[in-house]
Image (tube, coloured by chain):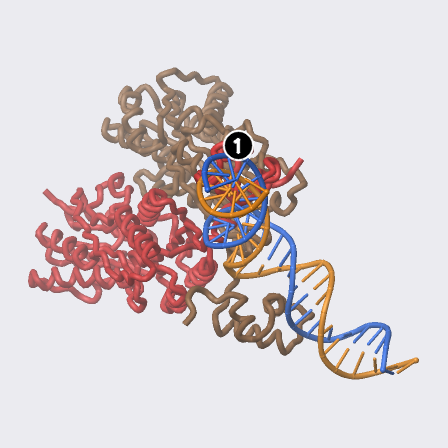
Chain colours: A brown, B red, C orange, D blue
Amino acid sequence: MKKGPVTIKDIAKELNVSVSTVSRALADNPLVKLETRNAVKELAKKYHYRPHFTALSLRSNKTKTLGIIIPQLVHEFFSMVIRGIEDHAYANGYNVIISSSHESYEREVIDTKALINGRVDGLMACISKETNDYEHFKEFVDRNLPLVFFDCICDEIDAPKVVLDDFDAGYQATKHLIGQGNTRIAYVGGPINLIINQDRMAGYNKALSEAGLNTKDEWIIHCDSGDYEDGRKRSERLVNSKEIDGLFAATDMLAIGAIKNAKKAGLTVPGDLSVVGFSNWSIGTLYEPSLSTMSQPGYEMGLKAAELLIKQIDNPDQMVNETVVLKSELIVRESSVSD
Amino acid sequence: MKKGPVTIKDIAKELNVSVSTVSRALADNPLVKLETRNAVKELAKKYHYRPHFTALSLRSNKTKTLGIIIPQLVHEFFSMVIRGIEDHAYANGYNVIISSSHESYEREVIDTKALINGRVDGLMACISKETNDYEHFKEFVDRNLPLVFFDCICDEIDAPKVVLDDFDAGYQATKHLIGQGNTRIAYVGGPINLIINQDRMAGYNKALSEAGLNTKDEWIIHCDSGDYEDGRKRSERLVNSKEIDGLFAATDMLAIGAIKNAKKAGLTVPGDLSVVGFSNWSIGTLYEPSLSTMSQPGYEMGLKAAELLIKQIDNPDQMVNETVVLKSELIVRESSVSD
DNA sequence: TGCGCAATTACAAACGTTTGCAACTCAGCT
DNA sequence: AGCTGAGTTGCAAACGTTTGTAATTGCGCA
């Protein structure tokens, strides 16, 4: 018995024809006699022949694979992004390889370099919050490998980008809180080195100043992560102080952390404190009170990123360089509306 | 200017040596003169030379890539499994390619076949709940490609497996409820065609009969999914009937669905109804009441699966065929303990 | 001068494909 | 009989590597 998978050679030998004939027959090339074509195809089917992926890639210099680099996998938003990417990729005959940097700059660099040579036809990346140096991405671009950024982008590099209108989202959320009659509104956000958080906060400030409201330094909190525990701890003193009547959190988890504090301090939400989160995680519908939040269209973002990337792969000469901005929508639930 | 990535050939040409010399120099082979070696390495560094992944794979017939097939990505358990797999894989020089079947049999087949020829060195799979036919996995094994199942396994195929002791977990959970003084205990589970759900229910039955307690057909509910909404709808009548004082759910989401029903019906949890979930999702700590649950060591499962797979890849002749059984632990929180 | 040996390097095959081109067969025509 | 051309098929190169073996060089020594 022969070991390993069936190759074109095996079929050729068994049929006493050359490999080129087999190759052509499988491609249904009319140059080869119908009889031969059928014989080849039959045998290929019998042996479950499947073209060797690596050989194909080497020949065509195409892997039909897209790389994704994201900071976290265990994350509803990123999972949705991946799903969007996958759907568009599969539909266009591409596979996908995902590398999760676990928010580590070092891992991000390793992953990027691992993908750099002939492994993927292009890359989609969301930079980690640790990342401040972009050399690894530059190297990617230098090799003419298509690159698309999404969500947490890097401004320094000339590449198409898909982002959320975080400024507008922050603005909408805060304006909604103001509309509910709140006047002392706090902001609890994620790492401020990320552009997305800068934008969300800028939107918050804009809405306040537009309404003639003031904020205080103590009402603005930056957390190292967007996690629940981080948010709970850091917002504890602020919430307990009872100085504020509204709170916009840049993450649903931060929002829930704050609400926990409020409950513990005997405050009611939304009665004493109105809260709006960010991202529309599924927990927001289950939590009590259910959480008002800003939508974050991850699926659409993934779809769009994949679309831009594949467009770039198919037209290598044409320098695409658009930035797609997706809109966020306010989702009103219990946590922000006192009746 | 030259296009595309630098190859060994480019370096060879520039240095007026042969490609083999360059190849050996880069491997630091003492056969080539130190001087030459250094010159080559220097140039390689200057041009950011990186070996072409596909070419390497073709030559060695190794992709140094492991395939993962899972039913869902947006799932805390699977995300942890992936993390475990990744950690072990990276540590051993392997990359990972993930295919999410989205619980679709069809997609699972497509994904498996896409990985089948020279794309990965081995595969780890958790079958979807739609899957009843295992031909695609058989084909994998027939080609001597290492395969490891985890969590939702397929008994028909001879391959190493990593599973949770679901029977014991179901037993422990139910026993805990009995220990809390509950005597009329219901079971709300996921799709019963999956072995894991059969086992969890069997554990439930064992604990009941051991304690001399009875159950009723109406107290046993099988949901098509393990989702919140499914669980809420299907357990509504049962919970409203107020016949039961304890409930073991095969998923945290099903548990929360049931608790929502109880709250709506004016019942207190755990006062009127004690609930134990399954999987230890993070929402369980945030929810009110916090949720008692069974741990599901996803990280360890992934780690072990990767370990078995790589062992198999490294020793192709040695037919490894062990089944690793991991234990689940009871995590007691508020939802099951009335004081 | 010529031989052998060590040191260094180059050549070529191989991995599994695809594809341009050459080669072969055979029938039909002059 | 010989030429043409259509219909088939095979050869060989190429993709970027690695590696066994052959080739080249220069030196020491008889």
Q: Is residue A106 left or right of residue B260?
A: right
Q: Label 1: chain? A: B
Q: Position of residue A25 (x, y in %)?
A: 61, 70
Q: Nearer the viewer, residue D10 or C20?
A: D10
Viewed as shown, does residue B141 lie left or right of B280? right
Using the rendered image of the protein, determine whether residue A145 is visible from the camera's viewpoint: no
- The image shows residue C28, relative to residue B216, as above or below, that is below
| Left or right of residue A244: residue B287 | left
How far across and how far down the image is residue C12, in percent?
Answer: 57, 55
Write down the quadrant of residue B190 in the picture: bottom left
Eyeballing the image, is A37 above or below A270? below
Q: Residue at x 28, y 53 (%)?
A: B254
Quadrant in which the N terminus of chain A appears:
bottom left
Helix, strand or loop at label 1? It is: helix
Q: Is residue A94 visible?
A: yes
The residue drawn where x is 48% and y is 53% is: B59
Residue A195 pos. (x, y %):
48, 27
Most foreground residue, B92 or B292: B92
The residue under the point 56% across, 30% down is: A157
User: Label 1, on which residue?
Assistant: B39
Is A49 or A281 nearer to us in this picture?
A49
**In the picture shown, does residue A189 fall above or below B5?**
above
Q: On the image, which quarter does residue A181 sit in?
A: top left
Q: Report the side of B168 relative to B194 (left or right).
A: left
Q: Give the amino acid type for the residue marked by disc 1 in the picture.
A: Ala
Which residue is depicted at the point 37% across and 26% down? A188
Is the C terminus of chain A in the top left, top right, bottom left or bottom right quadrant?
top left
The percent position of residue A98, horizontal first and vertical second, equals 44, 45
**In the depicted view, which residue is nearer to us: B250 or B6?**
B6
